[in-house]
Image (cartoon, grey):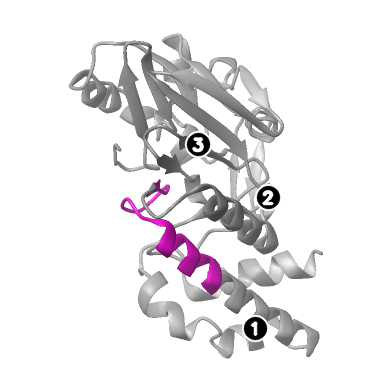
């Protein structure tokens, strides 16, 4: 696993070449290539995008120009091809140049055989975004789950990009059904984790979602729901003070549920 300013990267290197999951920001491409060169002299031939956010796909154009085959879910290419607006960040993201767009897309799942491993790329439910994929290295029992999971932070549910609380819970249940107690779980922005922590995170989501849903049914406003602190018993674990505030997480759930 390679860590940096963007999302965590998995690298599989061997006689077939280099298979990467995500590629961080464009200015980091040379540093990423230098790190990989310490492992192998093989070229980067596959890059999988777990979703569309710039900290995971920012290196696409650089690597595409080097000949890497970029792969993603259909919705990732659709969104990367057009201007996107993030309501949460109040930011417009321009489309990627042609070389940065995935050239192979899929709607459900696909399998790539490389470096002696059977690598399953699976589209999960619309949780973090509507184009989320997980990448499971079956022989090595390692899975990259993108930003659907973080064992040290509340999640970002990108409503503007089709994410939802119910989709996120569904995605995590899918992940849990695939992995076992020995699986190394790589998330977008934390350390290597495990199935127990995935399940703990899922249970937290279910609990807070139920509390927010109940208060919506009671006619409470978002301001009142936030004031009731439905995340309080989890803040010591998932509020890391550098990413998303508890009130952000509550707002994501609220917006997701009122859109249903």
Residue 126: give its label. Answer: 2
Neighbour tally class for label 1: few under 14, some 14-19, many 20 plus, Cα within 10 Å: some
Asked if the stretch drawn in magenta spans residue 106, the answer is no
Residue 183 appears at what percent x and percent y? 39, 48
Q: Quadrant of the C terminus?
A: bottom right
Left or right of residue 192, residue 249 in this image = right
Taking the spot 38% from the left edge, 56% from the top edge, the residue there is 194
Residue 173 appears at what percent x and percent y? 60, 57
Taking the spot 68% from the left edge, 58% from the top edge, the residue there is 164
Residue 135: give its label. Answer: 3
Q: CA distance from mark 1 to mark 2?
A: 21 Å
Q: Are marks 2 and 3 in contact (CB under 8 Å)?
A: no
Asked if the stretch drawn in magenta spans residue 187, the answer is yes
- Region rendered in magenta: 185-204
The residue positioned farthest toward the left in the image shown: 38
Residue 15 appears at what percent x and percent y? 32, 11
Camera-side mark, 1 or 3: 3
């Amino acid at each position: 696993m390679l860590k940096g300013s963007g999302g965590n990267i998995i690298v599989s290197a061997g006689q077939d070449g280099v298979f990467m999951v995500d590629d961080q920001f464009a200015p980091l491409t040379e540093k990423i290539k230098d790190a990989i060169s310490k492992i192998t002299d093989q070229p980067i031939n596959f890059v999988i995008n777990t979703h569309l956010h710039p900290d995971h796909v920012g290196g696409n154009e650089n690597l595409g120009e080097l000949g890497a085959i970029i792969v993603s879910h259909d919705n990732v290419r659709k969104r990367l091809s057009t201007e996107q607006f993030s309501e949460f960040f109040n930011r417009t993201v321009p489309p990627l140049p042609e070389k940065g767009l995935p050239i192979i897309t899929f709607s459900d799942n696909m399998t790539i055989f490389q470096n002696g491993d059977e690598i399953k790329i699976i589209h999960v439910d619309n949780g973090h975004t509507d184009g989320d994929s997980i990448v499971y290295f079956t022989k090595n029992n390692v899975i990259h789950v993108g930003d659907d999971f973080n064992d040290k932070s509340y999640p970002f549910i990108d409503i503007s990009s089709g994410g939802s609380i119910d989709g996120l819970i569904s995605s995590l249940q899918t992940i849990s059904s695939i992995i076992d107690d020995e699986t190394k779980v790589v998330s977008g922005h934390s350390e290597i984790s495990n199935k127990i922590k995935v399940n703990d995170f899922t249970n937290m989501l279910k609990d807070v979602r139920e509390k927010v849903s109940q208060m919506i049914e009671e006619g409470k406003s978002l301001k009142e729901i936030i004031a009731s602190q439905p995340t309080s018993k989890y803040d010591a674990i998932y509020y890391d003070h550098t990413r998303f505030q508890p009130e952000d997480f509550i707002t994501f759930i609220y917006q997701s549920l009122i859109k249903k």
